[in-house]
Image (cartoon, helix red, strand yellow):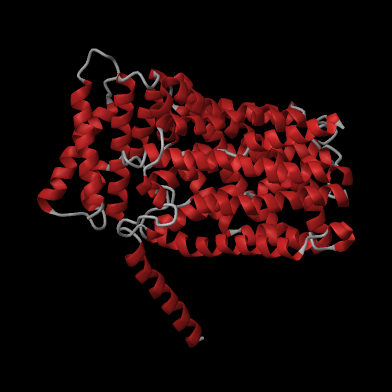
Amino acid sequence: MSTRWLQVGLGVITAIGSFVEVGSVTTAAQAGATFGFGLIWAVVLGTCALVLLLDMSGRFAAVSKRTYAGAIRERFGFKFYLLPLSAALVTNCLLLAAEMGGTSIAVSLFLGSEWRRWYPIVALLVWLAFWRAPFKLIENGPALLGLLALSFWVGIFKIGVPSPGLVSTMWHPHFQQGTVSEYLYIAVATLGATVSPYLVVFYSGGAREEKWSRRSLGINRASAVLGNGFGSLTAIALVILSAMVLKPLNIGANTLNEVGLSMARAMGPVGSFMFAAALFATCFGAAVEVLLAMSYNIAQGFGWEWGEEKQPAEAARFNTVGTLFLMAAFIVGLLGVDPVQLTLYATTFTALVLPISLFPFLIVMNDREYLGEQANRPWMNVASVVVLLIAFVIAVVSIPLMVLSGGGG
Amino acid sequence: MRRALSVVSLLMLSVALASCQFSQSEFASQAGKIGSEFAAAATTLRYVHEGRLLRGYADSSFQSYRSMLEGLGPQIPRMNGAPKGKRVERLVRLYRRAEKAVTHPCLDPGCDWRSQLRALNEASHAFQRASQG
């Protein structure tokens, strides 16, 4: 019994520690620095959708004993499976390059040199973790270090109470002339950063690695609801901190270095150190997870041998495809685009293709042949579809507007 | 076929009209970004000298600011929606002064970091105002 509670506790804690990554750091900081508390709703809405999707993902793996990609292929056929796979390839390639960029920037914040110098070393470390590290270490190691992100709340308490004018931006955001498209663009990027489909694949693959069964449904729900619920508080803290420190200084959080200035204002050098350490742990952890999720997706969809617990030679194609994907993302990162801009491209594109990525999964979650009495309840379908459509519609409206105005990162 | 073309044309016109109403011009958008980078540089410089920020963090940050501002200066007068005449000349002049502070920031205690701070703040405020029309 006590082991079971330990498992639940660890699941919740690691979910909290791994909630933020380069996407949520970038979008939360830009949201707060530009629109005060006016986009906290996007973090909350995205978290609700993520909780639902991760609960479904774990439930599916535990009850059906199947993998995410394997089920999509089995239910819809190989040709259809290629459609969500293509969307995942593009978004995850951009996201992996951005996560490695974020990790490199964190290293440069400690050592003071240009972040691009660290990029190849970070890529090598990510590859080594993917190639040799056991699943438990990948899942728990960076996530436990990522708990440093809770220091964002300490930063807020150090600075003091936000002004009533700032608090009122939560329900009455202030727009300067012509900034409606920017507001929508950051909203959609926030939703895309929070509801990342790679998390669904990674979570489902992890549940199979750990051989979840119906007995694991409690751990699944606790990790999904409590872990991500509390985890989202770190992203909300960053919105608040940026709104309190960066917005009055007219700093737009266009680079990750700027984001850490709010922690330096609150806690001095210790604050900037905590920010850099949290950025390193969360981005590195997310980079390995994105890579692993993409390898799961391809290997499971093509019916190859897969698993992080297996020796590389036992799952040769799984490891090879991961290595090739890492090389592709590495090349994208070398093109010179700043990680913040790359993150915004990745997250807005993610939101745009959310229906392609996740509607097939929702259909599978309603199939009683796979799930029996554990199939989705109607409210779960309605809630998920509403959030995915909101993200899609805002993406369709805001992306052309930002491109026409020469913005978009 | 004609009806489809009309619908597409109407949609494109709507997006174009909406972009005028809900989006900023290229100049306003870029001026806001430049103002923000100069503000970040000013804050970084101040925090280093107030002992709130480690030197390594500041070094890395200034490299990022340089990278963000790279090549923007000469483009300012040519941007869509940019002001004309003396207004734009003043912005370019302020940009050049502030850019020097970003390129060679005075991070050691001995040098005159306060004049760099003034240049960065002045440029930041001017670009922020210009971005709001």
Is the residue B133 above or below the residue A254 in the image?
A: below
The residue shown at (82%, 32%) is A309
Count of picture labels? 0
Q: Residue A243 at what x, y percent from top left?
A: 40, 42
Residue at the limit of the structure toward the top, as seen here: B110
Q: Is B44 situated above or below A318?
A: above
Determine the residue positioned at 79% across, 30% down: A6
Tell me what residue is drawn at x 47 percent, y 65 percent.
A397
Q: Quadrant of residue A267?
A: top left
Which x, y percent locates residue A67? 81, 49
Quadrant in the picture for residue A310: top right
Question: Quick one: quadrant of the N terminus of chain A?
Answer: top right
Residue sitting nearer the eye, B27 or A240: A240
Q: Position of residue A358 (x, y in %)?
A: 69, 58
Is A313 on the left or on the right of A283, as rendered?
A: right
Instruction: Locate residue B123, reporting x and y percent.
Output: 21, 38
Residue most toward the bottom?
B2
Does the rendering let one see residue A253?
A: no
**Residue at image x 22%, y 48%?**
B129
Q: Is residue A273 visible?
A: yes
B70 to the left or right of A388: left
Indicate left or right for A213 with A78 as reference. Answer: right
Closer-to-camera residue (B50/A23): B50
